[in-house]
Amino acid sequence: MLKRSHASIAVIADAHFHDLEGDFDFPGMTIDGQRMMVRSWAETRQSTRVFNESAKALSVALEEVRVRGIRHVVLLGDYTDDGQRQTTASLRRILDRHASEHGTAFYALPGNHDIFGPTGRHHTKEFLDQDGAGVWVTSDPASTAAGAFVTSRMYCEGYPAGLGAMAAYGYLRKPEYLHWETPFGLSDDIESRRYEVVSPDGSNRYSLMDASYLVEPEPGTWLLMIDANVFEPRDGTFEGGEEAAFVDSTAAGWNAMLRLKPFIVSWITDVCARAKALGKTVLAFSHYPALDPFDGATGAERVLFGETNIARRTPRQTVADALLGAGLTVHFSGHLHVEGVTRRRAAERQLTNVAVPSLVAYPPAFKTIQPVNGAIVVDTVELSATAIDPRLPQAYRRETKRVGEADDVAFNAEDYGAFLRAHKLALVHHRYFPKEWSQDVVRRVSAATVADVCAELLEVDAAGPVLHALATASGIPSNQVADCRMIDVIADWYCLRQAGHLALPAIAQERLRLYRGLSENFGREPDEGWDGSVAGFLSIFLGAFAAFLDRAENGARQIEITLQREAKEVVCP
């Protein structure tokens, strides 16, 4: 019999489970005799996450948990694709089965994709029919999408209804918990867990539920589960709690928490003080990062691309100050699908934010926590070697054939890691270039080579000496350096930004040396801003390689974090 490690914890962030074999009141697509609800490749290549691969990724992650003998699993928000009723119910059945068969205890936190405001919101997604044609499936009866299938199964619930299917996983008290509380006290009654929010002009006022809780699953370990979803009412006239009445929580996170949920910081302060007195280890979790998970390495993005998702979602210094003041030592976050460890100090205190990657974006991984002598060891479990479901490339090929497009290189990926790297390349073409990049720059670089870019930056017809120097430093023949496609360089730029040290094994050492050389020869810091020229853009873009490479080379698969503990006799309420 497998020996369970009761003290170990697995942290799975952004599983974004899509119910590939669920019932959305739509015929779907049948491949090899199996009916599937396949989301389109056209939508997938514009999304920062993949959809159809999520079910297998979650299954593999849970099997890794079982094999490693880990009993406790934190679901760090965005555990569903988009909070659809059908999807959430199916996820609950999967977790129930795993808990029943293997004794796994799950502790869930809501992310911005799992639940919305007090009444929820409609969703409309593109699925594939039997012939590979895109068909809209929606929960909105008023949808104007031609030929759309309307089903309530696509609806995303609000608070507290959206927690119902997952209520057994931490949101409510269970007899086996050694301790359980909320910011409002010991009761798990929904009505006792409400707080008030008001629009800036005072015209709209709502009583919302907060789903935070503190649980002690094993003696001495406190899991501080923080609901950092924030819904700020807008000025104006709206119906009830409709979606348009609120600022979406996606870009709010901890920056808005300080303003609209200040009681959470007070609670954290109290929990940390009690834990120190009782000799408990506090491990804090929320869906949103408490510190910049890129640790300053994305400074070029605001200059080049403006207010991107990354820029809007980066926590400000005031968040670090508040949490350091509260006595928090370690916090685990998801949301940005990034690998990273960030530390901040104030006097004798240190706060570490561990950013946990997603299961459905590059790099696919989750974290494990093992308490060891007043510290925790945080390890990384990668899923890159996972096999691809062979039905999915068949589905995507039907779709691209129908619209007359060539197959994407992702369809021939040898494993899940390679598929997600190819998906990142597709994102460059279909999301980053059209939505974030200067179109003048896109026209100049999308079909360019490194030789073309060198000439652009040097403003000469030939860049032979520089190419020769890059070739010598990188170990790549000069002609191959010259012919390197810039689109591949750009895709690796995004992979390094997102994956840190986890990207290094997938990029040849020669290529890494080439990127370092490009940064040293042509790169510059973004401080002076961008002058609007293609050369100026590229110099800032290539300069960012240095920060990404430094961050990656200083990263580690396993880290140890020392925790502050002090035991004495105190009664815990």
Image: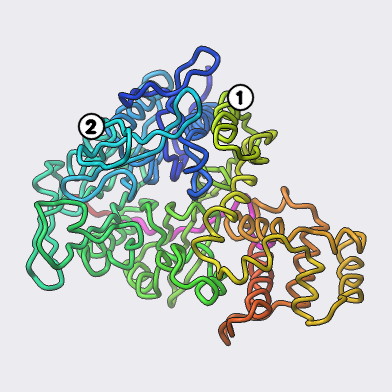
Outermost residue toward the top in this view: 33
Residue 59 is labelled as none
Q: Is residue 545 left or right of residue 149?
A: right
Is 73 in front, or is 509?
A: 509
Q: Quadrant of residue 126?
A: top left
Q: Quadrant of residue 311?
A: bottom left
- Looking at the rendered structure, the kind of residue marked 2 is Ser
Q: Can residue 478 be seen?
A: yes
What is the image's colouring?
rainbow
Image location of residue 135, percent across then percent down: 39, 33
Specify start and end residues of the magenta stretch as a single range. 552-568
Q: Residues within 10 Å of mark 1 (few under 14, many from 20)?
A: few
Q: Which residue is mark 1?
A: 390
Q: Can residue 176 be seen?
A: no
- Looking at the rendered structure, the kind of residue marked 1 is Pro
Indicate whether 267 appears above or below 334. Answer: below
Q: Is residue 422 left or right of residue 291?
A: right
Image location of residue 74, percent across then percent down: 40, 41
Image location of residue 321, percent across then percent down: 36, 74
Indicate whether 530 appears above or below 296. Answer: below
In the image, is residue 556 part of the stretch drawn in magenta? yes
Is 519 in front, or is 27?
A: 27
Q: Main secondary structure of the magenta part?
A: loop
Q: Is residue 212 left or right of residue 549?
A: left
Q: Quadrant of residue 201?
A: bottom left
The residue located at (9%, 63%) in the rendering is 204
Quote the CA–CA distance across marks 1 and 2. Answer: 30 Å
Badge 2 element: helix
Residue 152 is labelled as 2
